[in-house]
Image (tube, helix red, strand yellow):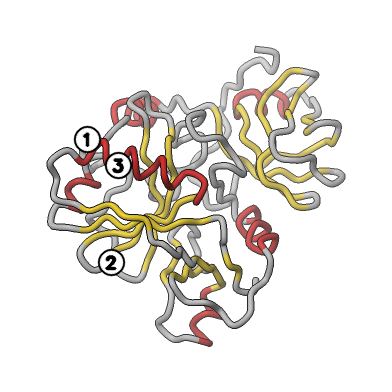
């Protein structure tokens, strides 16, 4: 994958003596182990445990950088400001947020030590760059194809903010949730889902028998809704589905379709969850 500029991203800086404690108390991700030279995923939740904002976080001098969708950056800053209260932390949006992404080997060959490793990818293959204009870039489809291939979901493309729990979109699988760090907004709901194993919706890999339909297309079994399409290119994409109903369809030999395209759904190879052993009736 060539270097890709992500023009749809924005950068928020949270700096000051209380920056880490302030963010640690409201975000899902445990900031303590975050190292220089890496970006890690996280989210800010509603009190009910739904994702309000997803982002990538990295350390900067005196605080942290939050890499989020530009379309929601203003609302994200407003929400952070609401929680800040008397914490000594400054929250600002970079005027010119330049974000690019490339494969690690290619980036290191051209710029040794340059870039931050994206920890969402288990193999450490992806590097994020901030503030430097690359000499050449590819279009966004190259990045989408790579992200889809590895089962990495993002809001806007694969799910809507305010509609998904962290477990639904695999944030529990990619280090975006600190289950041992203590309280944060929405923590009680997320911890209950984790300890009871009650997550029924999950992002899965989708492979179509023909080109997949657009994001948001219903995924059905015997005419009944089991989920919806996320990002897709050609015959490969992501889908947010009820895994109990998908398992029931598999057990009963029923076709799963995205629109009118038959699809095969599978769990990303790096994930640590499986289909439920006792599947629900596909018609539930």
Which quarter of the figure is the N terminus placed in? bottom right
Residue 195's disc is none
Task: Determine whether the residue tagged by mark 2 lies in a helix, strand or loop.
Answer: strand
The image shows a total of numbered marks equal to 3
Q: CA distance from mark 2 to mark 3?
A: 18 Å
Q: Which residue is under mark 2?
A: 60
Q: Residue at x 65, y 38 (%)?
A: 239
Given this view, does label 3 or label 1 mark the residue nearer the observer?
A: 3
Element at badge 1? loop
Q: Residues within 10 Å of mark 1 (few under 14, many from 20)?
A: some
Question: Which circle marks residue 183 in the picture?
Answer: 1
Left or right, 23 with respect to 56, comes to: left
Q: Which residue is mark 3?
A: 80
| Image vertical order of residue 251 relative to residue 81, above or below | above
Q: Around disc 2, counting alpha carbons within 10 Å, would you say few (fewer than 14), some (14 to 19), or many (20 or more)?
A: few
Q: Residue at point 60% right, 25% down? A: 244
Q: Position of residue 168 (x, y in %)?
A: 51, 34
Q: Between residue 84 and residue 242, name the one nearer to us.
A: 84
- Horizontally, residue 208 falls left or right of residue 133, namely right
Question: In the image shown, does 19 or 267 lie closer to the viewer?
Answer: 19
Q: Residues within 10 Å of mark 3 (few under 14, many from 20)?
A: some
């Amino acid at each position: 994958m060539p270097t890709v500029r992500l023009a749809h991203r924005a950068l928020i800086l949270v700096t000051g003596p209380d920056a880490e404690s302030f963010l640690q108390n409201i975000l899902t991700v445990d900031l303590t182990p975050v190292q220089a030279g890496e970006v890690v995923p996280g989210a800010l939740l509603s009190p009910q445990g739904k994702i309000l904002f997803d982002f990538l976080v990295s350390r900067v001098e005196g605080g942290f950088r939050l890499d989020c969708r530009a379309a929601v950056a203003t609302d994200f800053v407003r929400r952070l400001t609401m929680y800040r209260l008397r914490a000594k932390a400054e929250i600002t949006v970079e005027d010119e947020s330049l974000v690019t992404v490339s494969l690690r080997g290619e980036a290191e060959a051209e710029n040794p030590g340059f870039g931050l490793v994206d920890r969402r990818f288990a193999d450490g293959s992806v590097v994020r760059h901030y503030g430097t204009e690359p000499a050449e870039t590819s279009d966004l489809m190259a990045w989408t194809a790579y992200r889809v291939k590895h089962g990495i979901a993002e809001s806007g493309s694969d799910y809507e903010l305010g509609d998904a729990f962290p477990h639904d979109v695999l944030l529990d699988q990619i280090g975006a949730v600190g289950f041992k760090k203590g309280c944060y907004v929405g923590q009680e709901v997320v911890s209950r889902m984790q300890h009871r194993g009650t997550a029924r919706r999950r992002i899965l890999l989708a492979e179509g028998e023909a080109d997949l339909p657009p994001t948001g297309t219903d995924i059905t079994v015997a005419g009944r809704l089991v989920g919806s399409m996320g990002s897709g290119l050609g015959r490969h994409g992501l889908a947010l589905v009820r895994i109990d109903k998908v398992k029931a369809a598999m057990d009963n030999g029923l076709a799963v379709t995205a629109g009118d395209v038959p699809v095969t759904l599978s769990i990303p190879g790096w994930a640590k969850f499986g289909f439920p052993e006792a599947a629900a009736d596909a018609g539930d």
